[in-house]
Amino acid sequence: MHAIGVDIGGTKIAAGVVDDEGRILAQTRRHTEPDDAASIDAAIADVYAELSADHRIGAIGLAAAGFVAADRSGVLFAPNIAWRDYPLRDRVASLIEDKVEIVVENDANAAGWAEFRFGAARDVEDMLTLTIGTGLGGAIVSHGQLVRGFAGVAAEVGHMRVVPGGHYCGCGHEGCWEQYASGSALVRDAQAAAVAHPDRAGRILELAGGDAEKIVGPYVTQAAQEGDELAIALLADLGRWIGEGAASVAALLDPAMVVVGGGVAAAGDLLLVPARKGFADQLSARGHRPEASIVVASMGNDAGIVGAADLARL
Amino acid sequence: MHAIGVDIGGTKIAAGVVDDEGRILAQTRRHTEPDDAASIDAAIADVYAELSADHRIGAIGLAAAGFVAADRSGVLFAPNIAWRDYPLRDRVASLIEDKVEIVVENDANAAGWAEFRFGAARDVEDMLTLTIGTGLGGAIVSHGQLVRGFAGVAAEVGHMRVVPGGHYCGCGHEGCWEQYASGSALVRDAQAAAVAHPDRAGRILELAGGDAEKIVGPYVTQAAQEGDELAIALLADLGRWIGEGAASVAALLDPAMVVVGGGVAAAGDLLLVPARKGFADQLSARGHRPEASIVVASMGNDAGIVGAADLARL
Amino acid sequence: MHAIGVDIGGTKIAAGVVDDEGRILAQTRRHTEPDDAASIDAAIADVYAELSADHRIGAIGLAAAGFVAADRSGVLFAPNIAWRDYPLRDRVASLIEDKVEIVVENDANAAGWAEFRFGAARDVEDMLTLTIGTGLGGAIVSHGQLVRGFAGVAAEVGHMRVVPGGHYCGCGHEGCWEQYASGSALVRDAQAAAVAHPDRAGRILELAGGDAEKIVGPYVTQAAQEGDELAIALLADLGRWIGEGAASVAALLDPAMVVVGGGVAAAGDLLLVPARKGFADQLSARGHRPEASIVVASMGNDAGIVGAADLARL
Amino acid sequence: MHAIGVDIGGTKIAAGVVDDEGRILAQTRRHTEPDDAASIDAAIADVYAELSADHRIGAIGLAAAGFVAADRSGVLFAPNIAWRDYPLRDRVASLIEDKVEIVVENDANAAGWAEFRFGAARDVEDMLTLTIGTGLGGAIVSHGQLVRGFAGVAAEVGHMRVVPGGHYCGCGHEGCWEQYASGSALVRDAQAAAVAHPDRAGRILELAGGDAEKIVGPYVTQAAQEGDELAIALLADLGRWIGEGAASVAALLDPAMVVVGGGVAAAGDLLLVPARKGFADQLSARGHRPEASIVVASMGNDAGIVGAADLARL
């Protein structure tokens, strides 16, 4: 059965027709207005109309960046879109004439599910996916089942506390994992290093035009790839926090694999090697158990589309 | 179908015949020698012989304090019993003439499963059980399934790291949750308080005969129940760590309920009220989601027997 | 001998004629431009001209918010004024015709010295003053001598690390004491509480016109004085960090008194009582040593003027 | 003037005649009984009798491992000797017929003073000495004066808190610097590593005869000097904590030099290089201030004798 997956970002939606093997047969996108929820509903109906013209569609999966209701009918809360207890499924359904199953999924869950079904984790039954962009999202699969939790808000991995009294997080708490293992953390630490160790930050500052405020993650990655010592250390620190946090998750869930996706994953081994070391250093009962592998995600930017479509079919 | 559950401790085993409703129909126990694995095998066969004389038994569940193999056939490693990659299922089977299904389960998993099926958590589908004795064990149920992990060693909740650079743990790492939320932690903190604040530790020291080395958890609980200020503060601190750690677990798993069992739970509200406060203070996205309740376990000391028996039937 | 003390802020200078008993006999002030160092020199010369018309002046003490050179001739670095290796003494001297001793002092050192000579700490020989405004400054007196350090930059107490991996500090490091014991920390924590616990933050938000971004320290103090529970807890947390950090300082310096000044001190016992408890809870070898008292500063906003003048006379 | 310095350990005392240049002209020692304070008094009188036979002695300095009274007349409390508010000066004086000045000093203060007057720090006015043996002691000199504090118990540097909620310390608190920067910490971490990473601990375990309980600091140092990777990492971690803690002290005291003495200092650059890096990484306002050097102590095991004698003369 073919399904449509829709990845709903703040300012655009990307949609695709996905077959049973996770292949995207056709794709389209629309610009949207994050403050206007109805415009998003309409855009979804519109991409459905376009894509269903040439494909027989059995289900629509909507990947949303927010807390999704346990019955997958809508969004409880979204930080960047004007959704508050929003019945997304029914609003979209009212704009579509065909009878088609519509389900809402958390976007990180959808992306992780794509890795589990068709990507890096397709051969395991228990996995953790970390999607590391500006923030830190995640998806958990246990014994082949997506872990949604009782209210649908499981896998908010970025808000596991890793340092009591640690960095302030936008969620209102201190020391969340996201404050140590995300692109924002990398930028903050690079900017801090430019203040505390200007003698070592030359290359990173140069890429930022001499202005610490303009440092972004890709500059750090580029400098590291060129061999810059500070940039390598910053990525190693980020990797260490990924690995050490994953070891805490492994104490709870014992995954066979940790998949690292999102923009930060572009740093490759500069990130993964320290992550594996941090994981091994902190893994409980090491030597008495098999160990999870830590690998880069393989589904790319379309993971959300593929995962949402596949979950809608289940 | 009736099943036997066997709870295997270091120096004794307790066994019972359990019916489909989780009731124990008959019970027995034996003393064992933790350094002599064969003596434990024989004792299990012996209790089977005794209990199966009057009951028709379909399965045997063995609750073991250690890392259980993913196929539930034996124990990878046990800290207090001479089991190293020990094929417990087959050793016991070789001593029993009847054809009966035998499965090995982790003891904290078994106890938690009993709470899930017949106890405090019988009405929810997603839960976390914390068994807080000398150490901190746990069981996780997600969407009605026991989370075992890929190697069978999930729910080692006590080794989630909560303080980087924190208290040394017997596992070789620092800052494990068990070092902050366990009976051992309570005793250590009470002894430390007796050194740092002798003026405040009078009642606890009195119960311990004036010797800080002889402080045990029940003295702290008793003093707290009498209104002793230091004892109340010590239990509140323990409770806070339970709640704050549970909030990190909730960020990952979103349980409907956290069940607190084990000897420490005897402190009741002196522990639970601070635990609920710590949980609420640290729960991510509070206000945008339903919240887990934190309750005391209801199955008592037989939870391991009941849970092991029930899991053996599945 | 009479001396002039000048307290140099970012946008204004306040000056006074100070007698041997620490009394201010006359006072004046000027607006200045922080980006124009020469305008500050001129303003100082101008207040000297005004004040010396009616008083015979033996010395001028300049209290500067920055790192002061060991020979007290200038400022190595100031975060908020355009001083970089700036020879403040000689620049001011070149604008004054009289031969008069001019010395530069760190502003927190000057304020602390005033407390030591004429204020709350006038009866002790060893003290720590904490000046808690937006940031956290300090002054240390050991055996009656101001501790300046080898390079003149001692008593930067705000940058003692209290939490490894803790809150990012503008200095480029993590976990500085200033990030936990300052007005900025109070505001940050109040804003975070408004996000994490909106149900408890009602009164503070009301004072801020409903806008968390507009929360300032005095609103928290006012709400606490009215009995608001969250505000009381926020001040207690701030007080605890003051006390616990002071206990670490006491392990090094064993002061007889800790004087708490700056705007935050207006909260009085709401701050001091938790500070004393935090100090007592963390003080090493308590019971085997006399304990420092923790008191509010008594010299008010003129402490910088008085202390700078007095230090210039020495 | 010649003075006698006596270094009083738990089970022996070492004494010497010290001239104005810090040279030891004659030396002797006695065995003592830590539980019998009077036997220590007698032994001190005895070494005085022996040494004063050939030398004219003007003063006696007694270096004691404990809290020394502010008037240097006795010991408030000693962890390992039966001294509680013990008037050591007068007890010794009553056993000596000559009129000779007797003063009691803290042993780490005495050792640090020797470094300041005659050793590694003889050219600076502001210094911190760290004496790192089983525990972590210290001495602070500010502007050429020994910092004793108001009660005589300053420079208990080992009990500055560096990790909230960190390792339990024998003083009854958590996270004291001594728990991270001492020989005991090194041994604890080596033993923990042998549990958590047995694959990496081969050489250290070999030196300890295969028994983790028998690991001592010198085995780690030896293995590191042979190139063992784990041992090098353990010393680097210890060095890092020395340096990072010293950076916090430097925020308060701005010393020109940090002198590292005690048994652990035998590791030399394996310890010092990471210590310097940790210091530089954490030093506040680096680049805007001169930096303290970190060097090895030069006075050896006789530092306590020399320093106590010299302080007695002042």
Image (spheres, coloured by chain):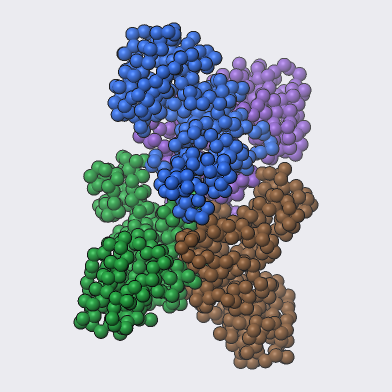
Chain colours: A blue, B purple, C green, D brown
Horizontal side, residue B300 vs residue C15: left or right: right
Horizontal side, residue A171 vs residue D202: left or right: left
**Residue A25 against residue D9 in the figure, above or below:** above
For the point 50% across and 51% down, which residue is it?
A202
For the point 34% across and 70% down, which residue is it?
C63
Q: Is residue B79 visible?
A: yes
Number of numbered discs on residues:
0
Classify the position of the N terminus of chain D by image quarter: bottom right
Please tell me in which quadrant of the rendered image residue C3 appears: bottom left
Q: Position of residue B88 (x, y in %)?
A: 72, 28
Q: Nearer the viewer, residue C85 or D121?
A: C85
Horizontal side, residue A204 vs residue D277: left or right: left
Q: Is residue C117 visible?
A: no
Classify the position of the C terminus of chain D by image quarter: bottom right
For the point 51% across and 80% down, which residue is it?
D71
Q: Nearer the viewer, residue D230 or D295?
A: D295
**Residue A308 against residue A137 in the figure, above or below:** above
Please tell me in which quadrant of the rendered image residue D75 appears: bottom right
Q: Position of residue B169 (x, y in %)?
A: 61, 46
Q: Nearer the viewer, residue D122 or C49?
A: C49
Horizontal side, residue C306 vs residue D213: left or right: left
Please tell me in which quadrant of the rendered image residue A297 appears: top right
